[in-house]
Structures are given as C-alpha cells and as structure tokens.
Image (cartoon, grey):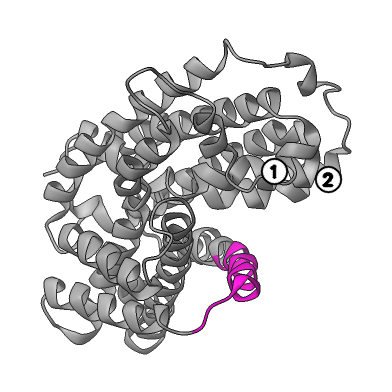
Amino acid sequence: MLTNKNIFFLIIQAQIGIGILGLPYILYNDVQQDGWMSLLIAGVLAQGIIIILVALSRTSPNETFYEINLRLLGNVLGKIVNISYVLYFISFSLLLMILVTDVINTWILHQTPRWAIILMLLIATSYIAKERILTISRSFLFFSFWFIVLIFLLILVYPQDIHFGRLQPVGSNSFTEIIKASPDAFVSLIGFELILFIMPFIKNPKKSLMVLTFANLFALTLYIFLFITCVISFSGVQLSLIQAPLLYLFRGLSFEFVERIDILFLSFWIVPISTTLVIQLFNASLGVQKLFSIQRKKSVYLLSFILLCLGLLPINLTVTESLSSIMIYLNIIFVFIFPALLLIIAKLKGIKG
C-alpha cells in the first residue's frame, strides 16, 4: 500500500516534468515579468481541482476512476467516457514524447535518428510503467534526488550577473492578461489527477488531500523559483527568444574539472522529466486493462507500440504547437470538467465521500 511519502513523490514527479525547461520562456512571452502571478493563479486553480478530485475518489475509495465512471454513468456511457480518457492519455503521452525527444535531439544526440530516441525513451518508460504503483513510487523517490541537484545548481547561478530590477514593474500587465496566461502555467502542474487512479492503493486515504496539497505547493514553489531565476538572469530580449532558458543558465556554469554543466545535467535529468510520461502510460494502461480485460503489462506494451507508430509520423514544429494548444483545452475538460460533473452526479445520487 502507498504511504504518504510514496504519494508525495509520485505527485511531484508527475507534476514536474518537461515543462520545467520551457515554462519561463512561455510565460515571459505571455505576460513578461508578471508570469509568477499567472503561476500563482494556476496553483490556486490546481488546488481547487485537487479538492474536487479527492472528493470524487472518496465517493468510492476502493475503485479506480474507470470503475467509478461505469458505476455512475452506466455500462455504455461509462465505457465511452473511459475510452475518451484513454485517448486523452495517449494524446498527452504523444506530446510529452515529442517534447522530450526534441530536447534530446537538440542538446545531446544531434545526429541520432528521431525513431531511435523515441524507441529508447519508450523502452525506458514502459519498463517502469508496467510495474505495480508501489514499485513506481519507489523509483520516483530515487529520481527526486535530482530536485536537490536542480535547486543547488540554480543557487550557483545567483552570484553571476543577475538583476532583481528585471522583476519590476510588478503588475505591468492587466489582470485579464495575467489570467489568460495561467492555462499555460496550469499545463505544467498537471499530474495530480493521478489520485483518481491510485486511491484504492493508498494506505491512509483520509490524509490524501493534505499530501496532495503539499505536493502541489512544492511544485508551484519550484516553478516560481525557476521563473524568477530566469527573469533576473536574462534580459527581456534574451528570455523572449530562448526556448529552454534553464539549460542556458547551466551552460554559463563551469568548473575546473567539469565543463558543459548543461549537457551533464540534462543527461541525468532526462529520467526525471520522463516520469510524467510514465504516469500517463500508467493511467492509460489501467483503462485499457478495464476495457479489454487484459493484463496491465500487456496494455503498457500495446500503448508503447501505438506511441512508437505515432512518433514515426512526420511531426514538425507546427504540428507540435497545434497539439500543445489543443492539450490546454483537453486538460481542462478531462482533469476538471468531467470529474466535477461526476462529483455532482454522485452527490445527486446521495453517495457521500
């Protein structure tokens, strides 16, 4: 059974993924130095949704989300919703796979064919995703060590040429513009929906809301710290052009015995930023297992094969940006709207959490 510690590290690893590399660039282009405000709004929104998800999962703590759907919506409509969620997780996994592959191709393996990187990535992630959730949580606990390394390296950046004045003026953008940028920040906080699929495996479900709250607060604080560090380290022109400012920050660090800290860091960081893909594969595999009554390991392999085939399609920057834009709306629908409607249905049926 999952302890509070297991849940905490599962959630933060699900939330903190590939978005950590490009979020400062995206937010700065949206609302400049006020991006931290958009992050705060996204964090508050995420916390509200977490309360809804926990309330829904507590209506039947011994069932996964797919089973709750069938019980509340009936066999036909429940299966349609379950299929929709599997397709959503596949789409999310595809986007994550493309983004991670592009980072590896650009920064480390310049001459390696795209298909080879995708294959290696899927082998690594499916190897973890096929395991029991307790085993996955233990591996995530080990990967979380890299958050300490990340924070330490960011602190090393501060003695360099930084200007806190770049955070001013505060509130130069209208409140409407800041709110409009919050969905971009919210995408990077996605991952807490995992609670819907692991509630039956939690040792102490009553404390799940508290643990998720602390995990969300940790992820939000790290993202804000990263955004502020990038803003005070780059000029406005630089930050509006650099798509992976975190790696450029590390590129400026060097020691007598180590050069190109960015490459060294990214080589190790590839595993933690791929954990979000592991979670999406895990969520989708539970759905495939429920729909087709096959072993979850086989469903992970089937999903990996589908993603491999999709990854071999000619995908350019335009397709990636379009998929990213679509996923913003799909995240709101599948992480917030559907669970909220199900919670309302549960309450109308007199089911107490």
The image quadrant that residue 33 belongs to is top right
Residue at position x 36%, y 66% in the image: 112
Q: Please state the horizontal and vertical placement of residue 215, each as a whole percent of the image.
A: 39, 33
Position of the N terminus by quadrant: top left
Q: Residue at x 27, y 75 (%)?
A: 304
Task: Identify the residue under disc 1.
Answer: 27
Q: Residues within 10 Å of mark 1 (few under 14, many from 20)?
A: many
Residue extending farthest to the front is 256
Q: Secondary structure at mark 2?
A: helix
Which amino acid, by three-letter code, is at mark 2? Glu
| Looking at the image, residue 343 lies above or below residue 320 | above
- Position above or below: 269 against 131: above
Residue segment shown in magenta: 314-330
Q: Which mark is residue 177?
A: 2
On screen, 274 above or below 230? below
Give the left or right position of residue 256, taking residue 46 as reference: left
Q: Earlier in the sequence, mark 2 or mark 1?
A: 1
